Amino acid sequence: MSGKKVKYILIAVFAVLMAWFIKDAFTQPGVQDLTGGFTEVAFYRNENNTGPIQRIYAVTVSDSLWEQMQQYGDYMPHTKYGTTKVYFFRQGQPAPAAVSPGEQNFDPQFQPHCLAKYEKDAMGQVSLVKRPFR
């Protein structure tokens, strides 16, 4: 093989690999692939970038699809040594418009309407508690 042929083959292989990487990057599964009709209604993230990052979400869902809720929580961003909490509420029912850090993450009037609480702690341990306020 001549040097020119090898050069064109390497360029072609590189182009194919780049196209594959780009396609793969844009076709990763995510929240949009879930069937539960998830809608984020409230979000909190502390501004402390030197310590543990806290992320708290309130999300409405069309049905009590526990596995889908687990997957939704798994798709949410998480930082090592931080915490991520997701509270799920049924669409059309009362849900908080704001969440905050602390022991109570939203107004207690919404607790009876909470379907589930997903939490990933600082060590990466995951839990999904059904009806956490009953």
Image (tube, rainbow, N blue to C red):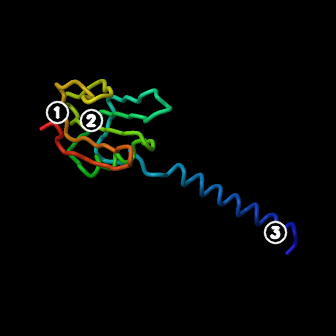
Amino acid found under the numbered disc labelled 3: Val
Give the residue at mark 2. 60
Q: Secondary structure at mark 3?
A: helix
Give the residue at mark 1. 113
Q: Is residue 32 visible?
A: no
Q: Residue at x 38, y 43 (%)?
A: 122
Percent across and percent down for residue 34 are: 34, 48
Image quadrant occupied by the N terminus: bottom right
Q: Residue at x 60, y 55 (%)?
A: 21
Q: Nearer the viewer, mark 3 or mark 1?
A: 1
Q: Residues within 10 Å of mark 3 (few under 14, many from 20)?
A: few
Q: Nearer the viewer, mark 3 or mark 2?
A: 2
Q: Secondary structure at mark 1?
A: helix
Give the residue at mark 3. 6
State the CA–CA distance, disc 3 to disc 2: 56 Å
Q: Nearer the viewer, mark 1 or mark 2?
A: 1
Circles 3 and 1, Cβ within 8 Å, touching? The answer is no
> Is residue 62 positioned above or below 50 on the image?
below
Q: Residue at x 19, y 40 (%)?
A: 115
Percent across and percent down for residue 55 are: 38, 34
Percent across and percent down for residue 23 are: 56, 53
